[in-house]
Image (cartoon, rainbow, N blue to C red):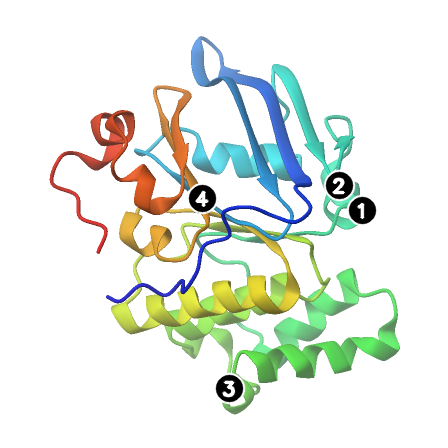
Amino acid sequence: MSIIKKFRIKSFKKINSIIEFENVTLAYGNRIILDNISFKINEGQIFGMLGPNGVGKSTIFNLITGLIKPMSGNIKISGVDVIQYPIYLRTRKFKIGYVPQHGGYFNDLTLHENFRAISEIVIDNKNLGEDRINYLISKFQLENYKDIKVKFLSGGQKKKLVIGLSLLSEPKILLLDECFAALDILTIKMLQEIIVNLQQENQIAICICDHQARDLLACVDVAIILSNCKIVAKDTPSNLVKNISAKDAYFGENFKFN
């Protein structure tokens, strides 16, 4: 597959971090999941997370949204320590959108009914709700499926729907959990183009975790490799695949990016 990202944002005019982990540690009982990790995601950046199963990628999303709390360390969003913020307040105050790996929609409702149901929760000005819905349905080219129940849609159509639902609140941060999993090549390319366009048009900071390393590296600005509870490497895609620690922990010697 050709590289979707035509350019990489290597530096930002305003290097403002929108998400910051400072020495974060998390354990379940005696099992350490994250061990004193620190990283930053900048405003308007597409940030990737790679690593083996169970290494803590989805856990980081749960920490960002407030579903769980760390044992120690600080998590800042837009410069504010959010450890004590509950989920509902954190996601609304700091405008966080989340796309889960599975689900995220009502199977027995139509596509349009899904948009209306979520808009009633996240859009305060009800007069603007339908305009926002129509805009997103058009943006993702879903007009022909408005009145079809979601359970009858394809995997790619469902993924576009869930991303559309996550954008109803006009988030500044978008979290995508395993967004390329179990999708065909053409659908993956479509999603990559959607992700890059969201950055270019909406300046959203996007964080992606996935096992599809080539697909993720094709559309991110920078990525980290997680292994043994630590961040072992962080760099641009072209540099990351050459990193010895990244090769040892995840890629192996024979991995080719393009």
- Cα separation, mark 2 vs mark 3, equals 32 Å
Task: Give the SS element for disc 1.
Answer: helix
Task: Give the SS element for disc 4.
Answer: strand
Which residue corresponds to mark 3?
A: 145
Residue 110 visible to the viewer: no
Eyeballing the image, is 7 above or below 38? below
Label 3 environment density (alpha carbons within 10 Å; few <14, some 14–19, many ≥20): some
Residue 133 visible to the viewer: yes
Q: Nearer the viewer, mark 2 or mark 3?
A: 2
Disc 3 and disc 4 in contact, CB within 8 angstroms? no
Q: Amino acid at mark 3?
A: Tyr
Residue 20's spot in the image, x, y percent? 63, 31
Q: Nearer the viewer, mark 1 or mark 4?
A: 4
Q: Amino acid at mark 2?
A: Arg
Q: Amino acid at mark 4?
A: Val
Which residue corresponds to mark 4?
A: 222
Label 2 environment density (alpha carbons within 10 Å; few <14, some 14–19, many ≥20): some
Which residue corresponds to mark 2?
A: 90
Residue 203 picture quarter: bottom right
Earlier along the polypeptide chain: callout 3 or callout 4? Answer: 3
Q: Is residue 102 left or right of residue 75?
A: left
Residue 32's spot in the image, x, y percent? 44, 14
Task: Give the SS element for disc 2.
Answer: helix
Task: Give the SS element for disc 3.
Answer: helix
Residue 248 picture quarter: top left
Label 1 environment density (alpha carbons within 10 Å; few <14, some 14–19, many ≥20): few
